[in-house]
Each structure stands twice: as C-alpha cells, then as structure tokens.
Amino acid sequence: MKPHSAASVFQVANLDSALRYYKDVLGFSEDFRFGDYAGVKFGEAYVHLCGHGVHKRPVGGGTIYIFCDE
C-alpha cells in the first residue's frame, strides 16, 4: 500500500459559514459537497469540513484521511 495524499477533516458548527470563510478569506475553492459534508482545496492541500449534525462529534474536533493506491 502506498499513500498518495491526505485530507484533514474538521468538525464545524455551520458548514455554510465555514465554506464561506475557507473560500472568501483563505482562498480555497470548493471541491465537492454532499449534504452537510464538503471538501475544499488550495493547490494540493485538501480540507474536509463536516457539519456537526453528521456525526455529533464536538465542534473543533477532527481527524485525517490518508488516501492510498490500494
């Protein structure tokens, strides 16, 4: 197995507000959105934003996904 990229996942209180901040203030572009879960990118940097209602995890918490070739 060979890792090829990673994306941090942040729990946010309001996905729409978080998306506006990442796009308008930080310069990211929206990569995808599925309900209350979205991904933004800036060059080769990827961040996933998860609305609080999806997993009921604490706002501000997070995890990381590591994408591999297998």
Image (cartoon, helix red, strand yellow):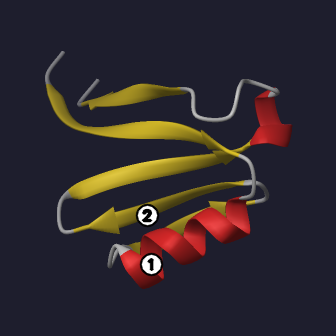
**Label 2: how many Cα within 10 Å (few below 14, some 14–19, many 20+):** many
Q: Which secondary structure lies at badge 1?
A: helix
Task: Name the residue beneath numbered marker 1.
Answer: 23
The kind of residue tagged 2 is Val
- The residue lying at 82 percent from left, 27 percent from top is 56
Marks 1 and 2 in Cβ contact (< 8 Å): yes
* Distance (Cα) linking label 1 and label 2: 8 Å
On the rendered structure, is 19 left or right of 54?
left
Of badges 1 and 2, nearer the viewer stands: 1
Residue 5, percent across and down? 21, 39
Q: Quadrant of residue 35?
A: bottom right
Where's the C terminus, which quadrant? top left
On the rendered structure, is 17 left or right of 21?
right
Q: Nearer the viewer, residue 25 or 11?
A: 25
Q: Quadrant of residue 54?
A: top right
Residue 2, percent across and down? 14, 22
In the rendered view, would you say 54 is above or below 65? below
Task: Name the residue beneath numbered marker 2.
Answer: 40
Residue 21, percent across and down? 51, 72
Q: Which secondary structure lies at badge 2?
A: strand
On the rendered structure, is 56 left or right of 9?
right
User: In the rendered structure, which disc, 1 or 2, sits on the residue that comes first in sequence?
Assistant: 1
- The residue lying at 57 percent from left, 27 percent from top is 61
The kind of residue tagged 1 is Lys
Residue 54 is labelled as none
Residue 64, percent across and down? 40, 27
